[in-house]
Image: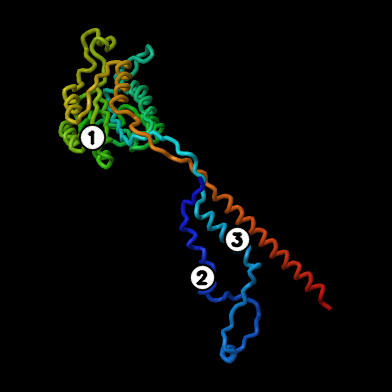
Amino acid sequence: MFELAWPWVFLLLPLPWLLRRLLPPADSGDAALKIAFLAELETLAGRRARAVLPGWRQQLPYLVVWLLLLFAAARPEWLGEPLPVPSSGRDLLLAVDVSGSMDYPDMQWEGEEITRLTLVKHLLGDFISERRGDRVGLILFGSKAYLQAPLTFDRQTVRTWLEEAVVGIAGSETAIGDAIGLAVKRLRERPAESRVLVLITDGANNGGEVEPLLAARLAAEENVKIHTIGIGADAQAGGLLGQFGFNPSLDLDETTLRAIAEQTGGQYFRARSSEELEAINDTLDQLEPAAQKLTQARLAEALYVWPLSAALLISLLLVVARLWHTQLQHVWNWKQRP
């Protein structure tokens, strides 16, 4: 279907005529005989001297050029058939703990021991890539909380920022309350039914300025749903130290994480291995589906290049014709010399 995006541009159609009527004639710069009493002669003749306009045939090419320029400025476009576009309008923020304890290598990935943050990068990166139709953002927190990537449809960029995160970049402590507070600040301007925060940590709140439960209360007031994930292996799965009764997840404050989730209408998950974290991703996809409804969009093909090219071609032909006529006139005048 053909359409003009800016049809109001054609209101400029009489602009050249108005300029011709309102502006004074341009001085050609050629020598001319000036008569001091020209005004008296015009009065005696009973009319005003007017500039002689070219005939309509001489003006027609310029009128065509002007119409083509207006047509191009009106943004002609060809709209294709309506296509379904998945759109949920969901705004999903991910808050990832990058404190010093996230460097502990008690996770397994393809038979190798890796750190907690590395596992989060592997599995949460896939989770980000599959959030088609959602705005996704990333918060990294340690002693302070920082917005690493604002809410955006560019999921690949968010995943890249997550993969480039390093342990200790935000400090060695864990400011869970500050991370929630920052998320509320960023989500409060979004639609109330689409505000979701997924918070991943392996410890307890021991830094920052805001208490986690107070931040959770503020989140509940702003309709921000928080899903919390506690990551870290149990004592029996903690490698060599686990065999001697050392619990690598001793610092994990599950009570607070569970209370945060319950207070905001979310859920708490425990990730002790890569399999459990992957299952949590699948559960989150079911709790917060990435596509709620379908909208329709048309692909628009811009057509302004055709009238614009035609105007340029006619303008070049007019210039060539004018130069050719001038050259022929000079040749004729030279031949007429005695």
How would you rate the neighbour count of disc 1 (Cα within 10 Å): few for under 14, some for 14-19, many for 20 or more? many
The reply to whether discs 1 and 2 touch (Cβ–Cβ < 8 Å) is no
In the rendered structure, find residue 18 and report the number of the disc placed on it. Answer: 2
Residue at the image position 43 percent from the left and 40 percent from the top: 297
Disc 3 is placed on an element classified as helix
Residue closer to the observer: 183 or 59? 59
Q: Which residue is mark 3?
A: 64
Quarter location, residue 296: top left
Q: Is residue 311 left or right of residue 214?
A: right
How would you rate the neighbour count of disc 2 (Cα within 10 Å): few for under 14, some for 14-19, many for 20 or more? few
| Residue 231 % position (x, y) | 26, 20
Residue at the image position 31 percent from the left and 31 percent from the top: 169
Q: For the residues carrying marks 3 and 1, which lies nearer the camera in this image?
A: 3
Going by the numbered disc 2, the residue's amino acid type is: Leu
Does residue 182 appear in this view? Answer: no
Q: Is residue 244 left or right of residue 63?
A: left
Going by the numbered disc 1, the residue's amino acid type is: Val
Q: Earlier in the sequence, mark 1 or mark 2?
A: 2
Q: Which residue is mark 1?
A: 224
Q: Is residue 103 above or below residue 145?
A: above
Quarter location, residue 204: top left
Disc 1 is placed on an element classified as loop
